[in-house]
């Protein structure tokens, strides 16, 4: 189980990412636009740098919804490999059964 402060920090980053994503994407498009002058592209880069650092999507970390574990994360299920194993053993995930041979 991860610390509550770490998961809350990650949730804060997710919210900031959603809030600033449209503005950040517009500025990124301006910086990559070759039709604009170098000065306009530079101004867009400066505005992009002034946005909060935690609003970048790369700062968000996928974590298990149950335990908060950052490693071994299954995107399709939203939980870690350990939680998948426990949920499968309890028959909580439809169509998944514990293998035995």
Image (tube, rainbow, N blue to C red):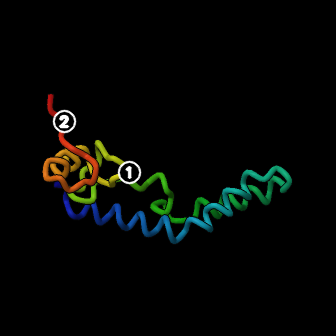
Q: Nearer the viewer, residue 6 or 46?
A: 6
Of callouts 2 and 1, the N-terminal one: 1
The structure residue drawn at horizontal position 80% and vertical position 57%, both measured from the top left corner, is 39
In the rendered view of the protein, which quadrant contains the C terminus? top left
Q: Is residue 88 above or below residue 6?
A: above
Label 2: element kind: loop
Furthest-bottom residue in view? 19
Furthest-top residue in view? 101
Q: Which residue is mark 1?
A: 76
Left or right, residue 39 beside residue 13: right
Q: Is residue 81 above or below residue 17?
A: above
- Coordinates of residue 89 in the picture (x, y in percent): 14, 47
Between the residue at mark 2 and the residue at mark 1, the CA separation in whole angstroms equals: 20 Å
In the rendered view of the protein, which quadrant contains the N terminus? bottom left
- Coordinates of residue 69 in the picture (x, y in percent): 24, 50
Label 1: element kind: loop
Which disc number belongs to residue 94? none
Q: Nearer the viewer, residue 90 or 13?
A: 90
Left or right, residue 70 beside residue 58: left
Q: Nearer the viewer, residue 88 or 80?
A: 88
The structure residue drawn at horizontal position 27% and vertical position 59%, both measured from the top left corner, is 65
Q: Which image quadrant for residue 20?
A: bottom right
The structure residue drawn at horizontal position 62% and vertical position 68%, both measured from the top left corner, is 23
Q: Which residue is mark 2?
A: 99
The structure residue drawn at horizontal position 67% and vertical position 56%, both measured from the top left corner, is 28
Q: Nearer the viewer, mark 2 or mark 1?
A: 2
- Coordinates of residue 50 in the picture (x, y in percent): 58, 64
Left or right, residue 33 beside residue 68: right
- Coordinates of residue 70 in the picture (x, y in percent): 29, 49
């Amino acid at each position: 189980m991860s610390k509550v402060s770490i998961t809350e920090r990650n949730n804060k980053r997710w919210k900031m990412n959603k809030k600033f994503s449209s503005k950040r994407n517009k500025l990124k498009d301006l910086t990559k636009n070759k039709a604009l002058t170098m000065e306009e592209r530079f101004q867009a880069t400066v505005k992009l740098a002034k946005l909060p650092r935690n609003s970048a999507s790369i700062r968000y970390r996928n974590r298990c919804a149950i335990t908060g574990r950052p490693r071994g994360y299954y995107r399709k299920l939203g939980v870690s490999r350990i939680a998948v194993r426990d949920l499968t053993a309890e028959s909580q995930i439809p169509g998944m059964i514990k293998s035995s041979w």
